[in-house]
Image: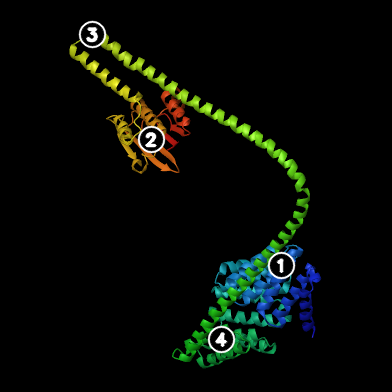
Amino acid sequence: MKYDSLKVFHKLLQEDSLLVMETYYMAKQYYLMGYYYERIAKNPDSAFINYNSSKRYYQKYGDSSWVGRNFLNMGTIQKDFNDFFGSKETLTEAIQFLIPDKDTTYIAQSYNLLATNHRKLLNFADAVEYYNKAIAISSADEDVLIYKNNLAVTYIDDKQYDKAISLLEKVLKDSLLIDNKDEYARVLDNLAYAKFLSGKEDKVDSFVRALEMRIQNNDDRGLIASYTHLGEFYSKDDPKKAKSYFNEVIALSKTIKKPLAEKDALKFLMQLEPANVNLRDRYIFLQDSLYEQELNVKTQFAKYKYDDKEKQEENLRLEKENAEKALEINRQRTQKMILFFGLALLLSGLGFIIYYFKERTRRLVHENRTAKMEATLETEAEMSRRLHDDFGAGLNQAMLMVQGDTDKTKVLDRLDGLYNQSRNFSREINEVDTGSQFKEEFLGMLRHRTPESAKLLISGSKDVDWEGMAPLSKKVLFKVLQELMINMGRYSKATLVTIGFEEKSNMLKVAYTDNGVGASKEDLKTKNGLRNTEKRIQAIGGTITFDTGKDDGFKASITMPN
């Protein structure tokens, strides 16, 4: 009768909008309903849903401890239905909310269940670790005995029989175990099973004692374990008796609705009766049914958690909308004043921005013109120096040769050299052809400037849209690469020069490298030609960086609009 009242009161709480606002009472009520469906009504789905709802209200109320307890109950349900991965995830969340100074018992239970999940998934090392954590943190001596028993079972599953026997013998001697008949029978049965598997004992006495205790205690789950162990014990020497025990397992598993135990018993029976087709068919049917059931359970529990998360997010969204509506009322009250002052500020700011951008545009135009002018003047200065130092010196030498009655052939050779020098000089200062022949003229210049002692490698030129490149960019590229090649030919003593082109996002990237002697930072500062290349590139909105060192080659990276 009291459970009927619980259900009626739960319905009233859900219908009464005033009581729904009492977050604490809703959290408590949903927890009680979860307990009812789990322990009394045996309805795990409804239990899971109610624990999940209780958890949500406790989160809203701000009680971290009870949030963790709900997660613990949900993880236990998932474990009981073989959703071991989902249970691990839920229990991990439980530990995050449980308070160490307050909830040591529940944290220990979480560790114990995590260990069981790992054991079921055959992760024995992790199972041992979590069982030991549960043992270390637990303050209840009876719980410690249970956790040690579980740890021993893990050792048995992992075939570490000596460890299992040593641990179970110590547990069996503990006086606290005598008062817990179910757990005493379980320890006794596990110890006998470990000794049997290890080959150290072939007596059935301990198995029988544990079985008798479980019959007296009406421990159906324990009876399944005893019947199964006795069936294994007799499988080799007395197959008939073994079959009778396995049949007891099957009958009992059907009574208490534990199909997994029936499947395990059928597995042993098939080994005793390999020709029995009915056993095989029943085993396959159960295996398929259990797999489908486990899959549905895992999907269902995951869906419950997902739906709850969606509901929480929806509630938060509604709360946000209500808060925004309330703020909107206040916002409208002050909007006119803000609008007035904002308009005045906007007009002032707009005037300042217009003035700023006008001044900035004028300054940038002036700087751009200055940069171009500096580049032009430095180019002219460099040409003048070369005309005076190189060509003028050569011409003066030829005049001295004529005055000194030097052999006519040598004079002619010298004049021919001066002619070639003037022709090359003319090429450098001539206007660059930016039309359809630019690519051929540009690549021809690179090859022409490569000394006979060096090898030139060019990559990526076929992928560049030379026709679409702006004329000014063509001129600057031609002059800059020409300067780099001249500098290489004069000073670097390079034997290999590589130039790579890459066009990307309306920008052209050029990578120049030679294996010459390089230059120090001080040398770079004194080379007018290289400084001039920087100004040329900067004048069109590009960049050039040099990477070199004494006896370490020379690299230049160019980025410019194409």
Inter-mark Cα distance, 1 to 4 = 38 Å
How many C-alpha atoms fall within 10 Å of the one at disc 2: few (<14), some, or many (≥20)? many
How many C-alpha atoms fall within 10 Å of the one at disc 1: few (<14), some, or many (≥20)? many
Badge 4 amino acid:
Glu
Q: Is residue 329 above or below residue 306?
A: above
Q: Kindly indicate whether the residue at mark 4 contacts the one at mark 2 (C-beta within 8 angstroms).
A: no
Q: Kindly indicate whether the residue at mark 2 contacts the one at mark 3 (C-beta within 8 angstroms).
A: no
Q: Which of the two labelled residues, at mark 2 and mark 4, occupies the earlier sequence position?
A: 4
Q: Which of the two labelled residues, at mark 1 and mark 3, occupies the earlier sequence position?
A: 1
**Where residue 561 sits: x, y (%)?**
45, 37
Q: Is residue 417 above or below residue 34?
A: above
Quadrant (top left, top right, bottom left, bottom right) of the N terminus: bottom right
Q: Which residue is mark 3?
A: 402
Badge 2 amino acid:
Thr
Q: Would you say 396 lies left or right of 283 here? A: left
The answer to which of 400 and 97 lies nearer the viewer is 400
The answer to which of 454 and 458 lies nearer the viewer is 458
**Where residue 368 sits: x, y (%)?**
50, 28
- Residue 56, numbered circle: 1
**Where residue 61 sits: x, y (%)?**
76, 64
- Residue 513, numbered circle: 2
Inter-mark Cα distance, 1 to 2 = 65 Å
Mark 1 or 4: the one toward you:
1
Mark 3 or 2: the one toward you:
3
- Residue 262, numbered circle: 4
Badge 3 amino acid:
Val
Q: Is residue 172 visible?
A: no
